[in-house]
Image (cartoon, coloured by chain):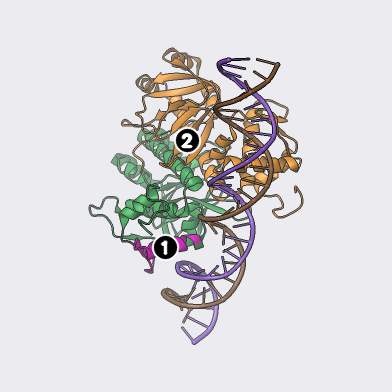
Chain colours: A orange, B green, C purple, D brown
Amino acid sequence: MPPYAEFAVGTAARRRLEALDDSAIARLEEISRVLDLPQGRPIIIEGDPAMSLYSLQIGVASVFKLLPDGRRQITGFLYPGDFLGITFNLNAEYGYSAETVTSCSLRLWPRAALERLFEEAPGVRRMFLAEMADELTAAQDRMLTLARRTAEERVAMFLITMVRRQADGAEAPCETLHVPMRWADIADYLGLTAETVSRTLSSFRDRGIVRTGMRSEIGLRNRQALEDIAAGTYARNGEIYS
Amino acid sequence: MPPYAEFAVGTAARRRLEALDDSAIARLEEISRVLDLPQGRPIIIEGDPAMSLYSLQIGVASVFKLLPDGRRQITGFLYPGDFLGITFNLNAEYGYSAETVTSCSLRLWPRAALERLFEEAPGVRRMFLAEMADELTAAQDRMLTLARRTAEERVAMFLITMVRRQADGAEAPCETLHVPMRWADIADYLGLTAETVSRTLSSFRDRGIVRTGMRSEIGLRNRQALEDIAAGTYARNGEIYS
DNA sequence: CGGGACGTTGACGCCCGTCAAGACATGTGG
DNA sequence: CCACATGTCTTGACGGGCGTCAACGTCCCG
């Protein structure tokens, strides 16, 4: 139905890119440029012609869609190693916008050069295929979350997802979560408002589940409670975590 | 993040399959079996090992995910020509469930045979790649809808989307929309309840926008109003369509 | 005709959005 | 070093949109 066909590659792309052979990586770096942006700047704008592919090197960025009256939905956060702006057809426009959440350093490829690379290196194409399949299942999970989960379940899910991603590779479970985005961004990611995010975190704090008040950090004091709340398997009207 | 990687191919697959050359289609039909199911039966169940790929021949089916307490989100409706159950990795389980909305006739391929076909016919793989890219942009649109749009906007969107799909190929715009699914299914697709869907349609009826009461059909009397409501560009607190 | 599935309508309430005020941190210029 | 502006988070009060529960009507199919 949509006339365009492109998407933002998410987290798994990092590991997949490392699986490419060295010559492909060398070629990729060869034809790229570097772009540095301060916090809160647009990277791509929905509707613009898709001329470039980006890879985030340093920082955090958000991918989002807007309604005409300003309502916003962040469809994903990008971390170092993630790709942005891939397209698979010719008259492509970006189907979403993206902007920096923190100051960012991006690698940028002109689209034509990248398409040449797609033809030459079959591993690159296969990587994107697997990547897209993962993105799609994640998107279905997020539909369930946005449509059916309560505010508490959404915030708990966000914390669990973020800490898992942060702990990715570390052996010991993380105790404190680094959260560089503003509450308003988290809210737009979860389909809530900044006030509801704040209230929910305060409630978690009062119940001894998290520690708040630090700058850009949230302490996870009772991870099991968060897991249970996120899974929807905690006592709903019960007293367990109240 | 998710350990599986598969998805339900949506509507665009119909046209794409037709673009395959005849020998590939012949091969596809050769190795398939046919499966007939009455209304309301499960086709695949989330978590089961992904042993088969399905193609819907006749009827309408739904793809959905469930929360442990029964909350349900329908991620898409399948129409004749759509595919279901594709996977791209080895330890694959289905990441969603699917069931028949009407009585259905399905074509079924054993997974191993299909993977062989993937190797032999590069066009098939490319078709699925483009298909997935379309699915992904549609998924992002649906995230925006589920998180941010009002009940009225969602129902209007549903009607517009369905009538566009129904009119696909016809030259004259359709006046009446065929809706084989129950209100509860529409609600689970839109992140609402059956009562809210009913109330919204009644409101549209009272405002002269649709005609209701027919069995499995909805008459679209003022399509422009529906387009405006769906787009979020109608006068919000205004009197235009009240 | 009777039973079950589905749609409609009303009453009610709660979750979360909206609006607003205040707290707190940061940066900036004098 | 302080006054002030700015941006962000917190907390409260309030209201509305939509979910929940229930009763009723309608259609279909034995």
Alpha carbons under labels 1 and 2: distance apart: 32 Å
Side (left or right) of A168 relative to B140:
right
Choose top left, top right, bottom left or bottom right for residue D22.
bottom right
The chain holding disc 2 is A
Residue at the (36%, 36%) spot, across then down: A4
Residue type at numbered disc 2: Phe
Residue B102 visible in image: no
Asked whether residue B198 is drawn in magenta, I would say: yes
Residue B216 position within the rendered picture, expressed as x and y whole percent measured from the top left: 39, 65
Identify which residue is drawn at 61% across, 38% down. A158
| Label 1 Cα neighbours within 10 Å, binned few <14 / some 14-19 / many ≥20 | some
- 1 and 2 marks on the same chain: no
Q: Which residues are magenta?
A: B196-220
Q: Amino acid at mark 1?
A: Ser
Residue hosting label 1: B203
| Residue A87: image location, x then y, percent | 39, 30
Dot 1: chain letter: B
- Which labelled disc corresponds to residue A64? 2
Q: Is residue A217 left or right of residue B19?
A: right
x and y percent of residue A199 in the render?
65, 43
Residue B52 vs A131, above or below: the answer is below
Left or right side of A99 for A200: right
Looking at the picture, tell me which residue is in the foreground, A16 or A94: A94
Quadrant in the picture for residue A92: top left
